[in-house]
């Protein structure tokens, strides 16, 4: 199954990840209201460890709020020196991911 290659966040369940690489990608999606194509930018990480297990997976996000948290670590590659804990929360109107880091 293709979904096995992607990190899945479950609301309220902490997910510990270690990243080895990242990239930016533009994707085209159809706007559900206007039915017009629109381009969205996403941040993609290559995941080498998930909850303490060695894996080869992808974590990606469209959330600009998350980008702002990771941005200081991307340019110098220091994001590789941390284990990141992500906690996804969701309500009727929005979702967000709380992020914390622990040095390796």
Image (cartoon, rainbow, N blue to C red):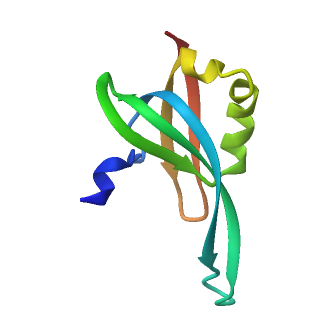
| Residue 103 visible from this viewpoint | yes
Residue drawn 58% across and 31% down? 99
Q: Quadrant of residue 92?
A: bottom right
| Residue 15 visible from this viewpoint | no
Q: Quadrant of residue 30?
A: bottom right
In the rendered image, residue 70, in percent from the top left (x then y), is placed at 68, 32
Query: 30 or 20, which is in the foreground?
Result: 20
Furthest residue in direction bottom, as rendered: 35
Query: 50 or 5, which is in the foreground?
Result: 5
Furthest residue in direction left, as rendered: 1
Residue drawn 63% across and 72% down? 28
Q: Quadrant of the N terminus?
A: bottom left
Q: Is residue 81 above or below residue 64?
A: above
Relative to 76, 98 lies left or right? left
Q: Is residue 94 above or below residue 39?
A: above
Q: Quadrant of residue 81?
A: top right
Q: Is residue 104 above or below residue 101?
A: above
Q: How many marks?
A: 0
In the rendered image, residue 27, in percent from the top left (x then y), is placed at 62, 66
Q: Is residue 37 above or below residue 3?
A: below
In the rendered image, residue 17, in percent from the top left (x then y), is placed at 44, 29
Query: 81 or 85, which is in the foreground?
Result: 81
Residue drawn 68% across and 64% down? 40
Relative to 94, 58 lies left or right? left
Furthest residue in direction top, as rendered: 104
Query: 23 or 14, which is in the foreground?
Result: 23
Residue drawn 70% across and 76% down? 38
């Amino acid at each position: 199954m293709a979904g096995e290659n992607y990190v899945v966040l479950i609301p309220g369940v902490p997910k510990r990840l270690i990243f080895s690489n990242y990239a930016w990608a533009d994707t085209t999606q159809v706007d559900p209201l206007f039915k017009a194509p629109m381009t969205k930018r996403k941040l993609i990480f290559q995941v080498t460890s998930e909850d303490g297990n060695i894996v080869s997976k992808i974590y990606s996000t469209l959330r600009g709020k998350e980008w702002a948290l990771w941005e200081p670590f991307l340019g110098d590659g220091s994001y590789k020196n941390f284990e990141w804990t992500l906690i996804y929360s969701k309500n009727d109107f929005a979702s967000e991911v709380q992020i914390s880091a622990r040095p390796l």
